[in-house]
Image (cartoon, rainbow, N blue to C red):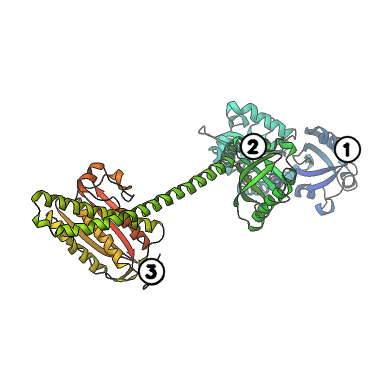
Amino acid sequence: MKKSDSNRLTKKQWETTARRFYDIFNDYVVIYDPIDGGKDFIIRYFNPKAEKTDKIKKENILGKKVTTAFPSVKKFGLFNVFQRVYKTGKPEHFPIKWYENNRIAGRRDNFVHKLPTGEIMAIYDNPTENKFFKDGLKESEEKFEAVFNSSNDGIIIADQRNKKFYTGNKVICKMLGYSLNELKNLSVLDIHPKKDLPHVLSEFKKQSERKIDVARNLPVKRKDGSVFFADVSSSPMIISGKPYLLGIFRDVTETKKTEEALKESEEKFRAIVENATDQIFILDKNQRFIFMNPAVSMLFGKPAEKIIGQSIYKFFPKHIAEQFVKLNLNVIESGKGNYSEQKMIIGKHEFYNSSQLNPIKNKNGDIIAVMGITRDITERKKYEDELKKMNEKLKEIDAAKTNFLNVISHELKTPLTAITAHLGILDDFKNSLEEQGRTSLDAIERNNQMLRMLIDNILETSRIEAGKFELNYSKVDINKVIKDSANNLKILSEKKGIHIIDQTKKLPLIDADEMRVKEIMNNLIENSVKFTEKGSIILKAKRNEKHIQVSVIDTGIGIPKDKIKNLFQKFYQVNSSMGRRYGGTGLGLTITKQLIELQGGKIEVKSELGKGSTFSFTLPINNHSQNNLKGGVK
């Protein structure tokens, strides 16, 4: 997991902060960089106090060996201390001793430490200059306080011997919730939870031994008992000849929460990837595997270590590898993912595979790799092929059925024509027949008409389904069509005591087949009359942007909600008893829907059982799908 380090205390930040304090120390601070494994030491830092007291400018001494800058250092005995501290990492006190060379002379009290950077720091005091110390103390303290309190991090100075706090800046007081006076009465042991003290002290020990630079995620206890987490770095310092520790605290609570959330998210993601049955992998721009989940190992029958770093060409026949590489290169060049399906061969195993490839970008937005997710779709392909074959078979059966109905209808029409002709002759003798004869003749005529209607409907729907149906477009006055249909069915409705009410608004002319629009209206109004015992039928029409909408609203028996979806199927009756009671072929609504959709419209039904139904259809005003208004469209 890539950690978020924007709020972390880095070695460089620690070093910069620490050296700002060294610049204003009243003690002398010099930092040396070991060379040749500690055989000598190069001067890297010289604070202003040392510069002034030792009567030398830092630019004339930085970068020089200590044995060159201070020729008497070995005789003085301090050089050996440097070497021991460098090797052991343990700080040493070199007691007050007289030092003299051709430039300076005086007593020196030295404390030598090894810094987190591996450098050696010497902090020393000159007891002969107490007057200078006193004179400059006030000025130094003012500078110290300014730097101390301007830091964004919490800073504490603690006595190295008893761990008691000497002072702290405003940020650390705010972090801990203590005033400065309260803080001075505490020690390191008071600002960490008791249960965590062993870990905290262990981390501090590692710091003192220079095993770590910064103690990460240490729990810190506030005055109110709440806990936050901080990165803590420390370094030694001398104040008035006494050893102290400078501690720098950075609150990383939010960073820690973010890292923990990222870690949890990563663990979940890893669990998903590791247990996925799909093959998940990453290829670099040279088509080499750089990541893969266990499913890829199972696919190739090889452990991950024998796949990682290998080219894709090693695992597939050349023509399949080239096909896959082409897809990868397309992702790299376009910067977009792609999905594909292909036949794969691994050894003697042939199968169908789906692949989803996506680019992986670095923080600069450059594509550095391609991630792939592949899945074996052999079974799905098999089912699709079977479904395709079944669909073709069903089409053949449907075509055969349509052809059969077409043929039968034509064959039935011939004798039906003869029956109709003879009924016309018999009708001339109707008045001479007895009542029983007249009743029988009426029944024959009625059933002959129903049979003719059924055959006509079958032929019409067969032609529509076969794509042999012609539409003759013209400019149609929809208001006139609605009015004519209402008048034609007025006698039928009035026999049942039902009123047809025309509430249509004035509409523009539309591009449509006038005869077929009349057929649509007749079917819908007749259907409403048939299933309405009392009340009325309201006809409405309005314009909806580029369409007209016509509605036929009745107060009939209504339709159960679960039956509405089947209304437009061929030969469908809501129930068999209704079919016997109300009659009909079961094709009227099927043909109506087909005629509406052929002309670019739609039909919908709303109904409530026992209260009535509303059939609404739309047709385009300007029908651009037609070839020619004067011609026909198949």
Can you tell which quarter of the image residue 453 is in? bottom left
Label for residue 521? none
The residue beneath circle 1 is 76
Q: Secondary structure at mark 3?
A: strand
| Residue plotted at (40% across, 53% down) | 403
**Mark 3, residues whose alpha carbon is within 10 Å: few (<14), some, or many (≥20)?**
some
Residue type at mark 3: give it: Gly
Name the N-terminal-most of marks 3 and 1. Answer: 1
User: In the visual, does 469 lie left or right of 348?
Assistant: left
Give the camera-side residue of 9 and 144.
9
Q: Circles 3 and 1: CB distance less than 8 Å? A: no
Name the N-terminal-most of marks 2 and 1. Answer: 1
The residue beneath circle 2 is 295
Give the camera-side residue of 232 and 521.
521
Q: Does residue 554 appear anywhere in the picture?
A: no
Give the camera-side residue of 379 and 126.
379
The residue beneath circle 3 is 632
